[in-house]
Amino acid sequence: MAKQETILEANGLTKEFKGFVAVKNVDLRVRRHTIHALIGPNGAGKTTCFNLLTHFLSPTAGRIHFNGREITGSSPAAIARMGLVRSFQISAVFPHLSVRENVRVALQRKLGNSFYFWRSQKVLDRLDLRALELVESVGLGAFAELPAVELPYGRKRALEIATTLALEPEMMLLDEPMAGLGQEDIKRIAALIRAVAKDRTVLMVEHNMSVVADLSDTITVLARGEVLAEGPYAVVSKEPAVIEAYVGTGHG
């Protein structure tokens, strides 16, 4: 069972850009069925780390394993097919399609054939049913036929999560899911993340500390591209080095 415990593991993850080291020797272990937050001041290397884990960037050094299988060097699409999916990677990119249709497009991608609808009305109907289930599951039932472009800002985040869920990920990477949201939307999206994490693993980059404290099982703190601390929020938030990193950069 020990092997099953860790779903995503990075060892010695490093990324250099022309002499600048953005991520330096990062070790990360994410346990299955947990919510793990990656936090740190601006410029700490969080988004670069995300890009390395999903291979939107190739590491200068280090190895990444997902479900016990090495994925270093795999393409982002191949990694997504394995069940490690980054949200907002396939956000609502079709503003004039309805909420339901956006989710259906994501379901068609999962089938690996975007032209299924052309071949079979039966397949289309089945996808529509599943799309509506996903739309309902993220609280967008009342908006199902609304063009995505007309969705209120906070609801767009819910749609992005629905399109990610359409790919049936075993693990979701959420990049700043609360960015730009008002208090009401933050509560809604936090509840949604908690719900989708029940039978999945979630790794998220997030600036909102009250959300991190509320949702996360484990927190990894990055500063200047290196791991500064790791553990539950109650422990990590009291560490002098962590307080210094935030206060020292004018970050609350």
Image (cartoon, rainbow, N blue to C red):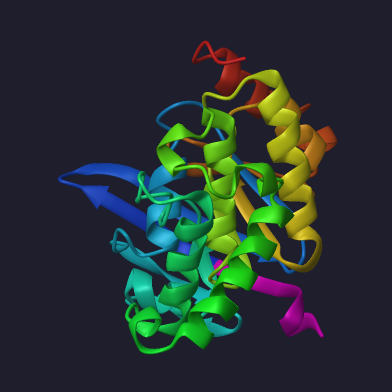
Residue at 56 percent across and 23 percent down: it is: 245
Q: Return the residue found at the far top.
A: 250
The quarter in which the C terminus is drawn is top right
Q: For the magenta stretch, what is the residue range? A: 1-9
Q: Compare residues 160 and 9 and report the one nearer the observer.
A: 160
Q: Compare residues 205 and 241 and report the one nearer the observer.
A: 205
Residue 177 shows in this picture: no
x%, y% of residue 225?
43, 41
Residue at 68 percent across and 49 percent down: it is: 141
Query: Is residue 103 left or right of 188 when viewed as pictured?
Result: left
Q: Compare residues 60 and 145 and report the one nearer the observer.
A: 145
Q: In this picture, is 193 found above or below 248?
A: below
x%, y% of residue 36?
69, 51
Q: Compare residues 139 and 5 and report the one nearer the observer.
A: 139
x%, y% of residue 95?
36, 44
Residue 6 is inside the magenta segment: yes
Residue 77 shows in this picture: yes
x%, y% of residue 120?
43, 88
Res. 238 image quadrant: top right
User: What number of labels is visible?
Assistant: 0
The quarter in which the N terminus is drawn is bottom right
Q: Return the residue found at the far left.
A: 18
Q: In this picture, is 7 found above or below 184?
A: below
Res. 39 image quadrant: top right
Residue 18 is inside the magenta segment: no
Residue at 54 percent across and 60 percent down: it is: 164
Query: Is residue 74 left or right of 110 when viewed as pictured?
Result: left
Q: In this picture, is 84 found above or below 25?
A: below
Residue at 76 percent across and 75 percent down: it is: 5
